[in-house]
Image: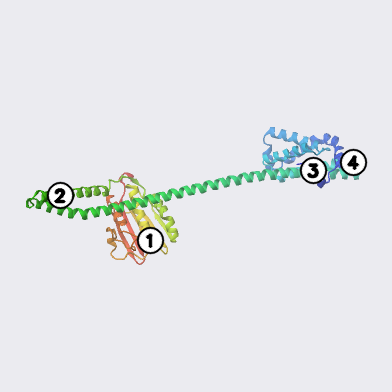
Amino acid sequence: MTSAALSDELAYFQYDEEDRELLAELRPVIEEHADRLVTAFYRHLLSFPETQVLLRDPLVTKRLLEEQKRYLLSLAGPVIDEAYLRDRRQIGEVHVRIGLEPRWYLGAYALYLSMLTPLVCSHVAADSMRGERMLVALQKLLLFDVQIAVERYIVRREHDLQHLNDELSLAGRRLARDLESTGAALRSTAERAHAAERLASIGVLVAGLAHEIGTPMGVIQGHAKLLEPHVEGEDAQWRLRTIQDQIGRISRIIEGLLGMARPSRPNRLPVALGPLVESTLAFVQDKLGRRRIETRLDLAEVPSVRGDSERLQQVLLNLLLNAADAMPQGGELQVSLAETADGEADLRVADTGPGIAGDPARVFDPFVTTKESGEGHGLGLAVAHGIVTEHGGLIDVSRSDASGTEFRILLPLDDTAK
């Protein structure tokens, strides 16, 4: 606070040199009664549980009594300058640091005023007008001290609130980054799952094409062999050998394609289907939300199955995406998991779409699809059927009518997990 600001502040309280001189007369009185006043103040603090807590430590109590006596003596006509302000601000900061609420130290100022008033009246009993001016000067000084203490409390609380606000802002930014990172990870995982499905579909396509091409190639190769005794001339023999060599080359290419398309041996590890369902649902949650599809889960605790989690997730992802595509205008997706009496995991995925047109049993055949042209190739369920089969399980359409379609997967439980 500048000197000009301090002068304005004192002028507002109307505290002047006359007030200081009146209070200076009280020094002998305050010195005589200081110990008694501090002891009375201490007993008053012990009357309240909230302030009792602050006085548990004897050292703290000793410092408190010493500071209170010093404060009482400082009321005897102080010169209010920058040093005075620093001292009063420090008192206010101590109040805040020890957790003393404003109502308690406001009460302390009021208590001192009530204890000093009889001493002032006794000191100037013969001059009531002078005693009145002394009491008014004392009130001005105490209220000035109250203002400084409250300002310190407000400043400290504003500082604490700003710190908390900064911490909340930082936490919010961290959460936003974590959310973006998690979203990116989910999108990346979903893309990998879609890529795996596409690769598996291409594998089925390659296998089908290799079979279709391999059969006529075998026939051509056989007829070329039969023609050898009936072809004369070096040029004709060379052409026949060229045909046979190229047919052999094509056959080797087909074998290579079949080797690439043929599913490798899956990893046989314990797989908990419940968490697998929940993590797979996360991949399609955006699509379900855009189509206003509600999800209902009924996942019982079932022992693990033994298999390849990535391939089983591919099956689930295919069923969930098909269910979402069957409900473009919204609906309900139901996923349930239970254990059958025969010791199998019973996983069901149901939608409230229009059902499957035609023979539901044919949806597992390659290239059979109920989707519009360009929206599906009829390979997803064929791949899913192959994955479930290689896991020793069964997948079928357990229900398909106007109320919707339900797919059911039965997988043997892991004997080692029981």
Residue 325 got which mark?
1
Q: Are marks 2 and 1 in contact (CB under 8 Å)?
A: no
- The reply to whether residue 301 is visible in this rendering is no
Q: CA distance from mark 2 to mark 3?
A: 111 Å
Give the image location of residue 359, x and y in percent. Answer: 28, 64
Q: Nearer the viewer's eye, disc 4 or disc 1?
A: 1
Q: Nearer the viewer's eye, disc 2 or disc 4?
A: 2
Among the two numbered marks 2 and 4 on one chain, the one whose residue lies closer to the N terminus: 4
Q: Which residue is mark 2?
A: 244
Residue 322 vertical position relative to residue 58 in the rendered view, above or below = below
Q: Quadrant of residue 320?
A: bottom left
Q: Are marks 1 and 3 in contact (CB under 8 Å)?
A: no
Left or right side of 224 for 42: right
Residue 4 got which mark?
3
Query: 10 Å neighbourhood of mark 2: few (<14), some, or many (≥20)?
Result: some
Q: CA distance from mark 2 to mark 1?
A: 49 Å
Name the kind of residue labelled 3 in the image.
Ala
Q: CA distance from mark 2 to mark 4?
A: 135 Å
Mark 4 falls on what kind of element? loop
Q: CA distance from mark 4 to mark 1?
A: 97 Å
Mark 3 falls on what kind of element? helix
| Residue drawn where x is 71% and y is 35% of the image | 61
